[in-house]
Amino acid sequence: MHNDRDLTIPALYCPFPAYKSEHYQEVKRNTLFWVENFQLIHPSAIDLFVAADFAAMTCRFYMGDKELMTWANDLLSLLFILDDVADHALTEDLPPDFLASIIQVVQSEVYFGENLLLCALAELWTRPVMISSKLKRELINDLSTLFKGIAWEKQNDQANRVPPFKEYMKMRPAAGGAALAATLVKIVARIDLPDLPELSILADLCARLGCLANDLFSLNKELNHSDNHNVVVVLMQEDKIGLAEAIRKAVHLHNQYMELFERLITQLPKYGKSQRVVDIYIKGLINIVRGNIDWSLLDSNRYGPLDIQIVNVLAPKFHKLAVADI
């Protein structure tokens, strides 16, 4: 158990403006109705689900019509519910091949069983939201990546293993569903994005930023539950440093990634006919980076009350990273 004096977190750098979709209230109502209709949450936990406010997260991340915003929020809420089930060791309530069953449902788009989570997923996947076959394939691949990340975490938990830093930074975004979050930018905005290596680098930085920020926001909770999947714990183990120094190092790394993310966006070339969709995608990644911070600090009770300052200016002699450093 760690008291609050151990967990002073220095200011996080984020130069981007806040955003929240005008469809927020409708998306929130629609998803709550859907969750209750499929009985995905026990009635005693509905208030906690409402307070977590996943709709605020979705509406800070994505730009699109209310139909696709609701679809994305239903999917993300379902995945958060599944994550909470796994985190609270309730997996005996799930079939042993449950994660494989999810992939099977989204590939076949049918489910005839009685598991309510899978029934909800099947309904979600058969809505007429006009997702291209290409983006559906991407989403299925993202789900597979997510489940591999979850399996990696479970294996570490069973072995009481703290992963090395490089391994952690590779696998943590997988377990956090970062690729799926970026793919949803394209789905919700209804854009067909060309394959461009510089956009992949930005998506990778977006993923790292989200995971580092989440690790800092959830640090107190995870220390109290002896969860090894936090960058602060990883740095303490790898560098043989104390908690306060590991927190400072994690914040500095977050701010270095943020500065690099910002700098690379300003250096992007012109894309001709593809400029409009590239601009929409970049704005979507920016919204995820900023929205994750605002949702965690302002909207949701998922991490408890947090007192973390956000700044939009760095110190003059701040050490900057190159792409080769990530």
Image (cartoon, rainbow, N blue to C red):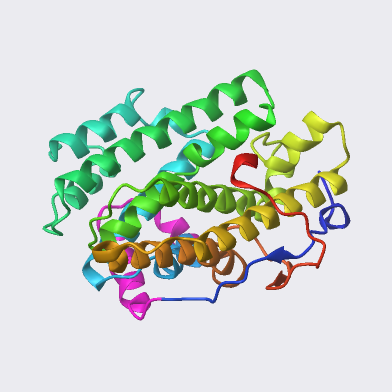
Q: Left or right? Give the position of 294 relative to 185.
A: right
- The secondary structure that most of the magenta stretch takes on is helix
Q: Is residue 282 above or below residue 238?
A: below
Q: Residue 284 falls in which quadrant of the image?
A: bottom left
Residue situated in front as seen by the camera: 85 or 280: 280
Residue situated in front as seen by the camera: 262 or 270: 270
Q: Is residue 47 above or below residue 183?
A: below
66 within the magenta span: no
In this rendering, does residue 41 appear at all? no
Q: Left or right? Give the position of 136 relative to 271.
A: left
Residue situated in front as seen by the camera: 286 or 173: 286
- Residue at x 87%, y 37% (from the top left corner): 241
Give the extent of the magenta segment: 21-48
Quarter of the picture holding the C terminus: top right
Q: Residue 243 falls in which quadrant of the image?
A: top right
Q: How many marks?
A: 0
In this rendering, does residue 168 appear at all? yes
In percent of width and height, residue 100 lies at: 30, 27
- Residue at x 61%, y 26% (from the top left corner): 157
Residue ranking furthest to the top: 159
46 within the magenta span: yes
In percent of width and height, residue 217 lies at: 66, 56
Residue situated in front as seen by the camera: 128 or 225: 128
In percent of width and height, residue 224 lies at: 73, 43
In percent of width and height, residue 1 lies at: 81, 43
